[in-house]
Image (cartoon, rainbow, N blue to C red):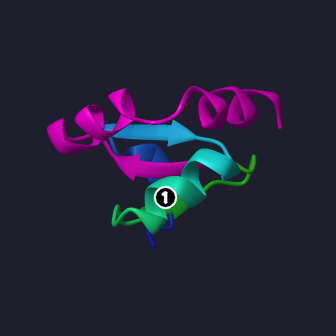
Amino acid sequence: MIRNPEILKNRFICGRILSQFLQTNGFPLLAIEENGKYSFRNTDILKEALKKIPWTIKVLDRIL
């Protein structure tokens, strides 16, 4: 994992629930930040996967 994720320009930041979903679907985790957020590399493949995520996971990730 990366120690200084704030230096990355092209990253996707999300919460714990969405992070677990992405990791189980094969996306590597870049970093866990101090504020409890998770960072992934923002690629075209990730963007396509985010379009297909069930709405319940998106809502729970924002609430929790």
> In the picture provided, is 48 more to the left or to the right than 3?
left
> In the picture provided, is 7 more to the left or to the right than 41?
right
In x, y percent, where is residue 22?
45, 55
Residue at image coords 72%, 54%: 34
Relative height, residue 58 to residue 46 (above, below)? above
Q: Main secondary structure of the magenta part?
A: helix
Residue holding disc 1 = 4
Of helix, strand and loop, which one carries label 1? Answer: loop
* Dot 1 amino acid type: Asn
Say if the magenta span includes residue 57.
yes
- Disc 1 crowd rating (10 Å Cα; few below 14, some 14-19, many 20+) is few
Say if the magenta span includes residue 21.
no
Snapshot quadrant of residue 27: bottom left
Residue at image coords 81%, 28%: 63
> In the picture provided, is 14 more to the left or to the right than 24?
right
Of residues 18 and 9, the one nearer the viewer is 18
In x, y percent, where is residue 19?
56, 53
Q: Residue lying farthest bottom?
A: 1
> In the picture provided, is 36 more to the left or to the right than 21?
right
Q: Residue lying farthest left?
A: 44
Relative height, residue 43 to residue 3 (above, below)? above
In x, y percent, where is residue 64?
83, 38
In the image, the segment drawn in magenta is: 38-64
Residue at image coords 24%, 34%: 48
Snapshot quadrant of residue 12: top left
Snapshot quadrant of residue 1: bottom left
